[in-house]
Amino acid sequence: MAETKQGQKARSGGGGEGGDAPGRGAASKIEKKGADLKAEMDSLVEEIDAVLEENAEEFVKNYVQRGGE
Amino acid sequence: MQKRIYGIETEYGIIFTPEGRKTLPVEKAIRFLFERLITTEHFLNVFLENGARFYQDTGCHPEYATPECAAPGQLIVYDRAGERILEDLQAYAEEKIREERIPGKLSIFKNNTDFVGNSYGCHENYLVDRDVDFYYLAEQLIPFLVTRQIYTGAGKVFQTQDGVRYCVSQRAQHIYQKISGTTTNDRSIINTRDEPHADREKYRRLHVIVGDSNMSEYTNFVKVGTCAIVLQMIEDNYISKDFTLRNPVKAIKDLTFDTTCKRRLRLDNGREYSPIEIQREYCELAWKYMEQYPVSEDLKKAVGMWQHVLDCLDDDPSKLDHQIDWVIKRRMIESYIEAKGTTWSDPRVFMLDLQYHDIRRSRGLFYLLERAGAAERLFTDEEIDYAKNEPPPDTRAKMRGEFIKLAREHSIQYDLDWSNIRLGNLLNVRVICNNPLESDTEKVAELVRTIQKTNLRKTSLSKLVIQS
């Protein structure tokens, strides 16, 4: 996903505020937002893993319903 | 129609996964769900204190039909209250399963498909003016219903011969007819079932069975609100668009595979439009209509959201990753795939798809996203909790709900359907309420008082019928 890739870049680029140079402030804000999103998604994935059915393959294969109305 | 009655019926998927040799047939699991419901009605088919109906449907699905609602927002609250009611019943059933010493897990899903090709539905019901010509209604509604899946779809990971694909809709693959009367075979875009549970001379019931079950409040609200404004325009003879599709059944199936939403559909007149373009035409007409005709607040809100959704879809559907089910789900799966360095054919991806619809707040992935702020809300938990036990104040459901409470309090025997209340030990006293917009509970209270005075257990009342 675009925003998570952006997040990675922001992270590998290392710290340091954008400073006051015109234009850079806005760019770093976007990068920061990307990094936030990446962190947010990472923590979500962890939460998902904690509740996701362990035997996914088996479970999905056995999930058979009769047709409804 | 200014005042419309709305309802949604949701069929839930249910499975018991044993952890050992002993298993539990799904019929028995459903019986456990119903056991806690106190009623004198038939087992497996009961009305609840909020006026809703809960029953076992064809194919052994627990089904929840909302009470009659007077506005789309109210309807979505009652639909979600159904998820919470079922979650409570599931907790009770799990206790019973433990008592029977059958190790395993019970799961209930608010979705529309399994992975071998079976489907169960989400049926929307709209009370419609009887004067509207049915063929005009169908002609205008079919292109709308075929193309609306771009913002109403719940998303589905689909295994095809060419690999795994992500589809917009759960239900679209299971539609085989343009118009028909059945709901189990040959499912259609427009269903002709016409049980208005109201004055047949004034109203017909429009039974829409092509929609997906929605988890997102936003998606669910836009789905019902846009359909309602289109119906209102049809009733006022305001629409005269010619979007008759050359092959609507093929179109609904083709569209579900197009996550760009820009694939062009061929019309009967030879022209080609994308689903976004067709929806835009209806939406623009709705704006014009609202300048000339009175429209409820909910519908105004829905049209604003409709515009927003179409603008985003045009630009980049990913922009709707907090609002529209299929986009929310896709983003979740993509993030998972990226974080785990896996691919779409990972079995966990199919599990993510399914578990997005799990109704337990502790395990359901949609609820997890919602708590994390990754899915926009329109209503509060307090509103939904209230709707679990209290009927809508402004429809017939109010009379039914209040009656059920009184009858239980006084241990009165009763039986119900949508427009009748029968009570007494011979069920010979009857209140008929043929007007779904009536909410006069005094009649119900008076009836209960009469019964108490005459002590129905000893004397048999002569047949008493109150027409309401």
Image: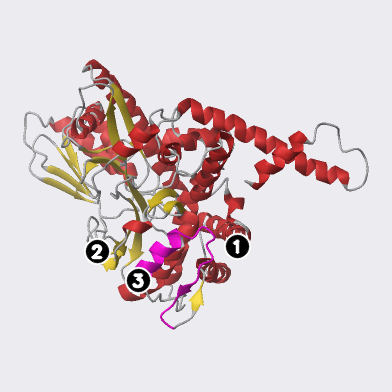
Q: Are marks 2 and 3 on the same chain?
A: yes
Which chain letter goes with mark 2? B
Q: Quadrant of the N terminus of chain B?
A: bottom left
Looking at the rendered structure, the kind of residue marked 2 is Arg
What percent of the width, then of the height, locates residue B405? Answer: 29, 32
| Label whose residue precedes the other's in the sequence (3 or 1) | 3
What percent of the width, then of the height, locates residue B234? Answer: 42, 71
| Label whose residue precedes the other's in the sequence (2 or 1) | 2
Q: Residue at x 58, y 51 (%)?
A: B320
Q: Which label number is shown at residue B314?
A: 1
Q: Secondary structure at mark 3?
A: helix
Circle 3 is placed at which residue position? Answer: B138
Q: Quadrant of residue B79?
A: top left
Closer to viewer: mark 3 or mark 1: 1
Front residue of this view, candidates B381 and B159? B159
Q: Which residues are magenta?
A: B248-269
Circle 2 is placed at which residue position? Answer: B200
Closer to viewer: mark 2 or mark 1: 1
Q: Real-space Cα distance between discs 2 and 3?
A: 19 Å
Q: Residue furthest bottom?
A: B269
Q: Quadrant of residue B406?
A: top left
Residue B234: tell me if it is visible. yes
| Label whose residue precedes the other's in the sequence (2 or 3) | 3
Looking at the rendered structure, the kind of residue marked 1 is Asp
Asked if residue A69 lies left or right of residue B461, the reply is right
Q: Quadrant of residue B96?
A: top left
What percent of the width, then of the height, locates residue B69? Answer: 38, 49
Q: Residue at x 66, y 47 (%)?
A: A2
